[in-house]
């Protein structure tokens, strides 16, 4: 059963749908949080989302997910129905994000074909408590509103009527031991007292903002003093009915004492009006931002999107490639080339244009905007802000930039790593920033843009930057360097942080700590044919630039010929090509050929020998040498001739061959315009190391 | 009545591929492959040589944008190689999610062979016989039925062992 689980189309659809909802929900949360309030529309949207999750999960019998979603739905139902409800926004966001994480984990399990068996009791309890607190608010609030209007109708009378006698009371509330979240409970008590009392003060005063308040309440109880004009019985009853109440002291006090205590407690809770005013202004702000956000949303994730299996796209691309070849076969058929056919020429040109456009289009289909990946970074920055107590804002630019689907998957992790490093080590604490004369809020800018056939992803922070001297000393002490400081360019020094084995020690923070796993980042990026550039100005921040190719599937290649075989070299790896004279070639005692070019000695690899391909071209004045470079190591490849430069679609070697053996130096294969196959050379696998190996072998053999 | 018909249809559908074999020739011998594995038959195509592979894997071909390796059955069964000609065919088989082309002298026909006519091969552990799943009698000929899964995986193991030595 468990294996065939995901095969069921129902489950697949469920997972897909729910994942999408959760992603949208998460984005919504993060964007709402930046505003500080949920707009009406957002509340409705979240309510609907939760409702959908609840429904579909219940249908799929994932009860844990369903009950949690149901509870969340309840919360938002209350918020939706009662606009006047005061609720603790940050706490709500926390609870929701926690639920989202729960959903995500469960969905992952379902996807893997396991039973979703996560324990939702903790989070469920949290949501329930929250729900209670706002529910209490809402019912009382309704009354309050009604009362207020009443009051306004008879302004003069009220003063006389209610102003019978003023009494002062002091109350101490203690909650049961297992009540938990005392601060929220206390807050809801205060909150709902508003209509019963004239004035109220309480201690600890920061119940909502401070989680430690719970501790204090547990120890000393929750103190309330208030001034009332009504029957004290009502208030007493109200307090008695507090949920989870353990004991209640309720005493009348003199106005003198009251005044003394008020100065002690000092903190008057914001009155209803203030709250509303606050809320309204925030709402105004939320609306404005939402307008902007809406615009963006329609741009990035509009409704008319269907999801297609990538395999289908791949085969479509294959078919189109085939079509292009077939077209060449027809239009350049030797049997018609000798004929002069004017209308045929015209028609074939038209055909050529259409097939070309089709090819471009198919490539474009695989392109996905970076926005979803970038959105995830918001969450990371938010969580880190919370955890580290930092104040860092993330600015995202150019998230509509499109990149091949495969690449997106591969850059998410490295990007996350870089952002973490920026927030953790790059940006200083608020105090340090103040001292340095910077804005207390740190900024990390995440930007993507196109540049030729590459996409640049730039992560820029305005933190403390890299201290080059320290970097150098550190690397030198680890034996990674043997050049003097003055000889190294800034870029070389900055790139030290990408070296494996560099730092990860305690002093990390001294030079902003990049280097923890940065070598992994740079390896990952290199594996997709990109590279990492580090720029930094000490004291002013660091910029990390990821340069990645638009797509994995297409490279600019140089086709070469050796005997009957054709090979393709990535054009980025080629430094130059030249014809050497026999006399320029040097042989060492092992017979390894080398050539001196501009004072530097390069080893030569004869492809025909390397792959044992029979060829007519054996002397250097007949063939051609191609100097290639990767990772600052180079060599010269000897081939028969250059065939020309061309954009090629990279295909992997068949699985059968890959399983059989990893052939050295072959990165894949591609189809040339005439339908024949060319093998793509992966330079990194040759290079100096490979030459050295050859050298060693020869040494061993005799 | 209807149900009966459905059952009959079901059985028939299942059976359309059962007991059918694609036969081909290598020299004087006839071999058969369970039709279930065969995806298509194409004429000989230009083959791109891939270095560092054993000689019976001739290289890779471009099959409508899909790149598949091709194996020469003659070399695989340690027979003398033969020039490719118009009759030479590549039988594309799909076994355990691997696609591979098998180069044969000529494709003969699709045969229906009833189970009564299929016997296990003599129990000898030598040479190429391990790729033979069974021996079938049809008309007056004897057809050697190939074990496709072994054909692909066995050599992998073999070669790995050789490589390790």
Image: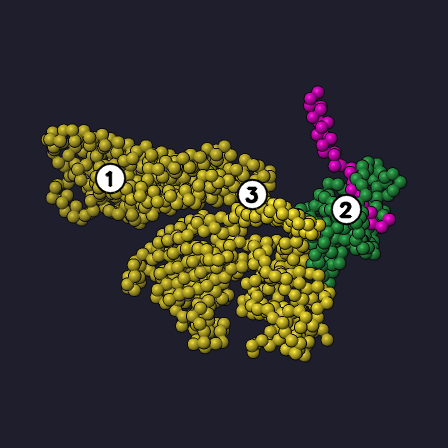
Chain colours: A yellow, B green
Q: Chain of mark 1?
A: A
x 36%, y 52%: residue: A386
Task: State how far apart marks 3 and 2 are (Cα).
Answer: 33 Å
- Residue A624, how many percent across, how many down? 64, 69
Tell me where the magenta segment starts and ends, as one range. B1-28
- CB contact under 8 Å: marks 1 and 3: no
Which element carries disc 1, helix, strand or loop?
A: helix
Q: Chain of mark 3?
A: A
Q: Is residue A348 visible?
A: no
Which element carries disc 3, helix, strand or loop?
A: loop
In this rendering, position of residue A3 left or right of residue B47:
left
Vertical arrangement, residue B89 with respect to residue A544, above or below = above
Vertical arrangement, residue B4 with respect to residue A372, above or below = above
Vertical arrangement, residue A176 with respect to residue A644, above or below = above
**Residue B147: image tag:** 2
Which residue matches tag 3? A309
Residue A605 in magenta? no
Mark 1 or 3, nearer chain start: 1
Which residue matches tag 1? A276
- Specify few, some or many for label 2: CA neighbours under 10 Å numbering under 14, 14-19, or 20 or more: some
Q: Is residue A645 visible?
A: yes
Q: Which one is nearer the viewer's eye here, A229 or A649? A: A649
x 28%, y 63%: residue: A437
Task: State how far apart marks 1 and 2 are (Cα).
Answer: 80 Å
Pointers 1 and 3 within a single chain: yes
x 53%, y 51%: residue: A406
In this rendering, position of residue A410 left or right of residue B106:
left
Task: State how far apart marks 1 and 3 are (Cα).
Answer: 50 Å
- Depth-wise, is mark 3 or mark 2 nearer the camera? 3
């Amino acid at each position: 059963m468990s294996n065939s689980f995901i095969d069921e189309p129902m489950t697949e659809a469920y997972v897909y749908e729910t994942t999408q909802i959760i992603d949208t929900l998460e984005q919504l949360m993060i964007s709402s949080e930046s505003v500080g309030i949920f707009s009406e529309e957002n509340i409705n949207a979240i309510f609907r989302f939760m409702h959908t999750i609840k429904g579909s999960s219940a249908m799929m019998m994932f009860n844990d997910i369903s009950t949690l979603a149901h509870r969340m739905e309840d919360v938002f139902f209350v918020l939706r129905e009662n606009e006047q409800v005061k609720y603790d926004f940050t706490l709500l966001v926390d609870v929701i994000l926690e639920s989202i994480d729960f959903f995500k984990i469960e969905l992952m399990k379902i996807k893997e074909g396991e039973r979703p068996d996560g324990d939702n009791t903790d989070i469920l309890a949290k949501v329930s408590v929250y729900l209670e607190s706002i529910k209490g608010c809402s019912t009382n609030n309704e009354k309050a509103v009604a009362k207020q209007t009443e009051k306004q109708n008879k302004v003069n009378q009220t003063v006389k009527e209610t102003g019978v006698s003023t009494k002062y009371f002091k109350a101490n509330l203690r909650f049961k031991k297992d009540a938990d979240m005392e601060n929220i409970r206390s807050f809801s008590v205060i909150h709902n007292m508003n209509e019963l009392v004239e004035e109220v003060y309480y201690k600890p005063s920061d119940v909502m903002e401070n989680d430690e308040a719970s501790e204090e309440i547990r120890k000393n109880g929750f103190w309330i003093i208030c001034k009332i004009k009504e029957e004290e019985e009502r208030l007493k009853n109200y307090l008695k009915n507090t949920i989870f109440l353990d004991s209640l002291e309720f005493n009348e006090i003199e106005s003198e004492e009251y005044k003394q205590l008020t100065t002690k407690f000092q903190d008057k809770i914001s009155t209803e009006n203030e709250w509303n005013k606050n809320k309204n202004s925030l709402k105004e702000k939320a609306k404005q931002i939402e307008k902007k956000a809406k615009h963006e949303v329609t741009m990035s994730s509009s409704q008319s999107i269907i999801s297609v299996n990538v395999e289908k796209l791949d085969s479509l691309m294959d078919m189109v490639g085939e079509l292009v070849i077939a077209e060449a076969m027809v239009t350049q058929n030797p049997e018609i080339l000798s004929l002069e056919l004017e209308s045929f020429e015209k028609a074939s040109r038209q055909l050529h244009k259409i097939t070309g456009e089709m090819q471009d289009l198919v490539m474009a289909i695989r392109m996905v905007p970076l926005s979803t990946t970038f959105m995830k970074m918001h969450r990371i920055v938010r969580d880190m802000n919370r955890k580290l107590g930092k104040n860092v804002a993330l600015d995202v630019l150019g998230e509509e930039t499109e990149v091949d689907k495969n690449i997106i998957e591969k850059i998410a992790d490295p990007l996350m790593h870089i952002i973490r490093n920026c927030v953790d080590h790059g940006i200083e604490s608020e105090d340090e920033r103040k001292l340095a004369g910077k804005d207390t809020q740190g900024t990390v800018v995440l930007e993507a843009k196109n540049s030729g056939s590459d996409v640049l992803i730039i992560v820029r922070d305005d933190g403390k930057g890299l201290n080059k001297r320290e970097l150098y000393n550190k690397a030198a002490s680890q034996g990674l360097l043997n050049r003097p400081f003055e000889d190294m360019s800034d870029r070389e020094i900055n790139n030290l942080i990408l070296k494996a084995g560099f730092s990860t020690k305690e002093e990390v923070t001294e030079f902003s700590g990049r280097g923890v796993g940065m070598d992994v980042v740079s390896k990952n990026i290199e594996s997709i044919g990109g590279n990492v550039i580090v720029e930094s100005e000490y004291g002013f921040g660091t910029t990390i630039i990821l340069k990645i190719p638009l797509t994995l599937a297409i490279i600019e290649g140089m086709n070469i010929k050796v005997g009957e075989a054709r090979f393709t070299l990535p054009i980025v790896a080629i430094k130059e090509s030249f014809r050497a004279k026999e006399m320029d070639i040097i042989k060492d005692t092992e017979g390894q050929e080398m050539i001196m070019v501009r004072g530097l000695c390069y080893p030569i690899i004869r492809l025909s020998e390397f792959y044992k391909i029979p060829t007519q071209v054996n002397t250097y004045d007949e063939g051609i040498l191609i100097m290639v470079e990767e990772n600052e190591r180079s060599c010269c490849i000897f081939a028969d001739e250059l065939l020309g430069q061309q954009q090629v679609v990279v295909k992997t070697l068949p699985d059968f061959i890959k399983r059989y053996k990893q052939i050295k130096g072959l990165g894949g294969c591609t189809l040339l315009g005439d339908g024949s196959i060319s093998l793509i050379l992966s330079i990194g696998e040759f290079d100096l190391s490979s030459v050295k190996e050859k050298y060693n072998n020869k040494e061993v053999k005799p | 009545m209807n149900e009966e018909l459905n059952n009959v249809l079901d059985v028939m559908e299942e059976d359309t591929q059962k007991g059918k074999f694609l036969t081909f020739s290598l020299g004087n011998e006839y071999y058969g492959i369970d039709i279930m594995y065969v995806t298509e038959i194409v004429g000989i195509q230009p083959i791109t040589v891939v270095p560092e592979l054993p000689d019976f894997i001739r290289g890779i071909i471009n099959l409508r944008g899909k790149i598949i390796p091709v194996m020469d059955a003659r070399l695989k069964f340690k027979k003398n190689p033969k020039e490719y000609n118009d009759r030479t065919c590549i039988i594309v088989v799909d076994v355990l999610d691997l696609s591979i082309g098998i180069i044969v002298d000529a494709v003969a026909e699709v045969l229906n062979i009833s189970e009564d006519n299929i016997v296990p091969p003599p129990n000898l552990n030598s040479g190429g016989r391990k790729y033979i799943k069974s021996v079938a009698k049809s008309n007056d000929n004897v057809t050697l039925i190939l074990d496709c899964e072994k054909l692909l995986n066995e050599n992998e193991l073999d070669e790995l062992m050789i490589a390790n030595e």
